Image (cartoon, rainbow, N blue to C red):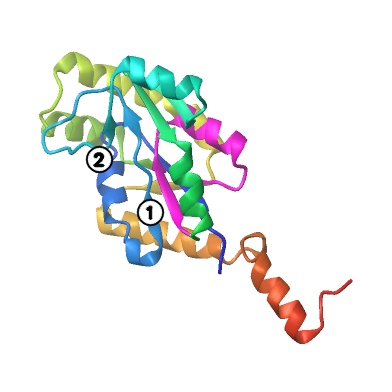
Amino acid sequence: MVEGMVLIISGPSGSGKGTVVKQLDPVKGYARSISVTTRKPREGEVDGRDYFFTTEDAFIHMRNNRELLEHAVYVGNYYGTPKAYVEDQIKLGKVVVLEIEVYGAVQVKEMMPDAVLIFLIPPSITELESRLVNRNTEDALTISSRLKKAQEELPFVAQYDYLVVNDKVDHAVSLIDCIVEAERLKPKRNQQTLINFSQKEGVFNA
C-alpha cells in the first residue's frame, strides 16, 4: 500500500479553496480534515461536516493539551487541525486534505516535512474582490481586511510546492489530482513496495 500523505491547500479568502476541496473525490483516496474554529457558522455550514465549531475556552484547552497539529488566528477567529484524525487517516493510506491558511501550513510543514503544499489563487486581485463581494457574507470593512490579508500572504507562496490558479473549479481539481498522482509515485512514499520487490526478486539487498 502506498503511504498516505498530508495535502495542504491554502489561498486567500475568496479564492475558492473551499469549493475545490469539496470536489476532491474520496474514491481517489482523499480524506478531508475537519478544522476546529471559534468563528460562527456561515449559512449552510454544518458542525462536524464543514468545521468543528467551538468556544475560545475549549479551543485553548485543546491547544494546551497538544491536541492540535497546528493553530492560528485569522481575521479575529481561532483555527486548528485535530492531530489524531490526521495521523489515523495517513496510516490508512489516505490523502488527508488540510484547508488552512499560510501560517498554519508552515507549522504543519515543520512537523511533517513530507506534507505537500498547494497555494490556490484566482486569476487576479480584481477577480478576488468580485468573488468576495458577490458571496454577500461580509460587509465592506471585512472585505477590505481580507484583500489586505491576501496581499500579506503572497510572500509565503515561495514556501509552497505548487501554485494552482483557480479560474475554473473543474480544471483546478484536475491539476490537484495530477499533483497527487505524481507525489504518490515518489519512492519515499512506496517503501513497502520496494521492500516487497526486493524480497521477491532478490535485489536491493545491499
Check the image and report above or below for 131 versus 147: below
Which of the 4 quarters of the picture holds residue 198? bottom right
Residue 15 makes an appearance in the image: yes
Task: Indicate the quadrant containing the N terminus: top left, top right, bottom left or bottom right.
Answer: bottom right
Mark 1, residue position: 31
Which of the 4 quarters of the picture holds residue 17? top left
Image position, residue 142 (x, y; %): 22, 17
Magenta includes 108?
yes
Residue located 62% across and 43% down the image: 113
Magenta part of the protein: which range?
Answer: 94-119
Q: Is residue 190 left or right of residue 170?
A: right
The furthest residue to the bottom: 201
Check the image and report above or below for 203 versus 121: below
Residue in front for this viewpoint, 20 or 32: 32
Residue in front for this viewpoint, 181 or 169: 181
- Mark 1 or mark 2: whose residue is earlier in sequence: 1
Number of numbered labels in the structure image: 2
Q: Residues within 10 Å of mark 1 (few under 14, many from 20)?
A: many
Image position, residue 26 (x, y; %): 33, 61
Mark 2, residue position: 50
Residue located 10% across and 29% down the image: 136
Q: Residues within 10 Å of mark 2 (few under 14, many from 20)?
A: some
Q: Is residue 159 left or right of residue 142?
A: right
Q: Which secondary structure lies at badge 1?
A: strand
